[in-house]
């Protein structure tokens, strides 16, 4: 019998109806032979095989001699977890990619909104100002353009399929390139050769020692004049100062950003925390979103569906998806 310890399940107790519905959907979908243990206290006896936790404690990792799998119930690898888990080489680390589609949809939304210069037009029209209709139109046509996707994983592949349906040529980078039905996939080392070909640059990369600062002044200037940049990966992959200057001086047509450089440190600061050290908010050619691309009204149901699929594979003794390479950070 497979035993799972989920110390902080978000929906097992009182909560919103939708939250309880999501939790019940998980329970209903699980193999009946499986036992899910919940609560902050470590079970006694501690004989669980899978631990579901984003930031596990040493006690949780060491209590059960049967523990072989840590499942992070979201995409990504928290920094503190990355530092801890090498001490436990017998425990494989996996995560969920339940929000890949909604993140990709946000990237597409940012791309199209930025390319069509929609935000300043909408702002003017709310004031009943029709003049932008009769002025030169700055919007870009996407059909026939080339999109370069950095990070061709779950999110990047969905973006690629949508962009291809829009009539775009798709280039992509991936650590381990493979044949793909919609994209020409290259290793990361090809970046500087690919940038001059890209009318749209879409970043879906995680933040690692290899990707931090990957797109700086040189890389942005390698893009053709009038290119669009979209970032739904991590803010620090893209140099904020280089991006700001390229948007200000007209080298870039526009940008759509969902990930940032400064985040609120507590609940009180959520009402007024500048997301960057430069005033992106003063630029009309930037579409800004407060790192909400991975969410939706249905996302918790989707999370529980992916979680149930993962656990049922484990119960059946099947290979488990989304294993993280701790050295690479994803």
Image (cartoon, grey):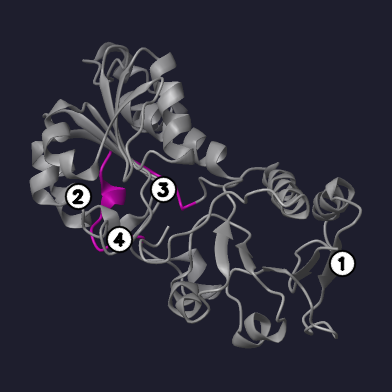
Q: Secondary structure at mark 2?
A: loop
**Image position of 179 (left or right of 11):** left
- Which mark is in front, 4 or 2? 2
Q: Which residue is mark 4?
A: 276
Q: Which residue is mark 1?
A: 13
* Number of other residues with Cα within 10 Å of mark 3, as a class: few under 14, some 14 to 19, many 20 or more: many
Of marks 4 and 1, which one's residue comes earlier in the chain?
1
* Alpha carbons under labels 4 and 3: distance apart: 12 Å
**The magenta segment:** 275-291
User: Is residue 109 among the parts visible in the rendering?
Assistant: no
Please tell me which residue is depicted at 72% across the width and 48% down the height of the picture: 313
- Which mark is in front, 3 or 1? 1
Please tell me which residue is depicted at 55% across the width and 64% down the height of the picture: 93
Please tell me which residue is depicted at 79% across the width and 82% down the height of the picture: 46
Q: Secondary structure at mark 1?
A: loop
* Alpha carbons under labels 2 and 1: distance apart: 44 Å
* Res 140 label: none
Q: Nearer the viewer, residue 307 or 297?
A: 307
Tell me which corner region of the image, top left, top right, bottom left or bottom right, holds residue 171. Answer: top left
Of marks 4 and 3, which one's residue comes earlier in the chain?
3
Q: Which residue is mark 3?
A: 258
Type of secondary structure dominating the magenta stretch: loop
* Res 215 label: 2
């Amino acid at each position: 019998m497979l035993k799972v310890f989920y110390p902080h399940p978000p929906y097992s107790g009182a909560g919103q109806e939708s939250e309880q519905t999501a939790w019940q959907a998980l329970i209903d979908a699980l193999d009946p032979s499986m036992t899910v243990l919940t609560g902050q206290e470590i079970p006694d006896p501690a004989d669980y095989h899978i631990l579901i936790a984003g930031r596990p404690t040493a006690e949780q990792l060491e209590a059960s001699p049967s523990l072989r799998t840590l499942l992070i119930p979201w995409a990504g690898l928290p920094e503190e977890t990355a530092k801890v888990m090498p001490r436990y080489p017998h425990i494989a680390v996996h995560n969920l990619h339940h929000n890949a589609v909604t993140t990709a949809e946000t990237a597409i939304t940012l791309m199209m909104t930025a390319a069509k210069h929609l935000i300043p037009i909408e702002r003017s029209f709310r004031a009943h100002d029709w003049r932008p209709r009769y002025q030169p139109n700055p919007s870009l046509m996407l059909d026939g353009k080339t999109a370069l996707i950095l990070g061709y994983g779950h999110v990047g592949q969905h973006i690629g399929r949508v962009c291809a349906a829009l009539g775009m040529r798709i280039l992509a980078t991936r650590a381990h390139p493979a044949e793909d039905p919609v994209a020409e996939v290259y290793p990361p080392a090809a970046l500087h050769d690919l940038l001059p070909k890209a009318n749209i640059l879409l970043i879906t990369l995680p933040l690692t020692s290899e990707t931090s600062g990957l797109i700086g002044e040189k890389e942005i200037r390698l893009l053709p004049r009038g290119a669009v940049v979209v970032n739904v990966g991590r803010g620090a992959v893209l140099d904020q100062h280089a991006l700001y200057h390229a948007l200000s001086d007209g080298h870039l047509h526009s940008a759509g950003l969902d990930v940032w450089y400064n985040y609120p440190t507590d609940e009180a600061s959520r009402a007024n925390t500048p997301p960057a050290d430069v005033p992106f908010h003063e630029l009309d050619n930037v579409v800004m979103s407060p790192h909400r691309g991975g969410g939706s009204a249905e996302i918790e149901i989707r999370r529980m569906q992916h979680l149930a699929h993962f656990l049922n594979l484990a119960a059946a003794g099947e290979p488990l998806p989304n294993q993280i390479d701790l050295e690479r950070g994803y």
